[in-house]
Amino acid sequence: MNVNKILIFLMILSILGTMFVYSSLPEEIPGHFNFRGEVTRYDNKISVFFTALLPLAIYILMLFLPKIDPKRDSYEKHKKAYDMTKLIIVLFLVVLHWTIISYSLGLNLNIGHFVRIAIGIMFIVIGNFMAQVRQNYFFGIKTPWTLANESVWKKTHRVGGFSFLIGGIIIIVSSFFNGIISLVSLIVAIFIAAIYPIVYSYIEYKKISE
């Protein structure tokens, strides 16, 4: 089990910091935002501990999953990609948590702008390492066709890495626009990053199986 002590320290510090500022929070804090960054739901402030503990829960889960994966040997081959993914996801969740706290304490933040930039950066980082990911059942682009054929898996993850990179850039750019342009940009980014690699894996598998 490869534990990142610095990351553990950061998560514990975040939890302790949350406990410290808890009494200063209003009784209700934002629980959901739309793509414009507008608050669409408020929750009781006790919910702040959910977002405080979520990074640690996700990190522990990602440490545990390789132990039960039938293809656990793959994790040694893509160790750098998996470690970097754990890092960027945890950092994103910690930043999102403190963004919500800062907003709740009255800091004038454009949540939509800030979160989209953070998501875009996360996509770009993950995309840069995606080609290293080897076949497994928990991590990567898992479709019936990538799991059925190792060659399709490798090709899909090379294409997927580029798709995530492009999608991340589009998401960052979309954060500087409002209205229909922003919404369309987000839809295009999601299609490129999430849908296209799935379609590609099917097409590649059909080529091989014919």
Image (tube, grey):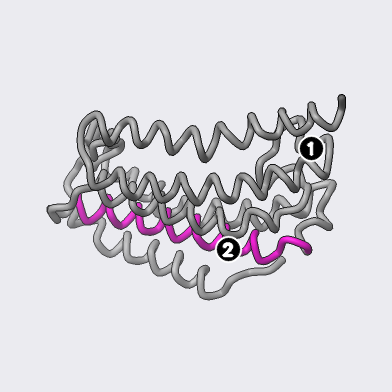
- Of labels 1 and 2, earlier in sequence is 2
- Residue at screen point 23% across, 36% down: 36
Q: Are the residues at dot 1 and dot 2 in contact (C-beta closer than 8 Å)?
A: no
Q: Which residue is located at x 55 percent, y 55 percent?
A: 126
Residue receiving disc 2? 84
| Identity, as a three-letter code, of the amino acid under mark 1 | Leu
Characterize the magenta stretch by its predominant secondary structure: helix
| Circle 1 SS class | helix
Q: Secondary structure at mark 2?
A: helix
Indicate the position of residue 110 as horizontal and vertical percent values. Answer: 19, 48
How many numbered circles are shown? 2
Q: Residues within 10 Å of mark 2 (few under 14, many from 20)?
A: some
Quarter occupied by residue 107: bottom left
Q: Is residue 133 magenta?
A: no
Residue 164 x, y percent position in the rendering? 52, 47
Read off the magenta span.
77-104
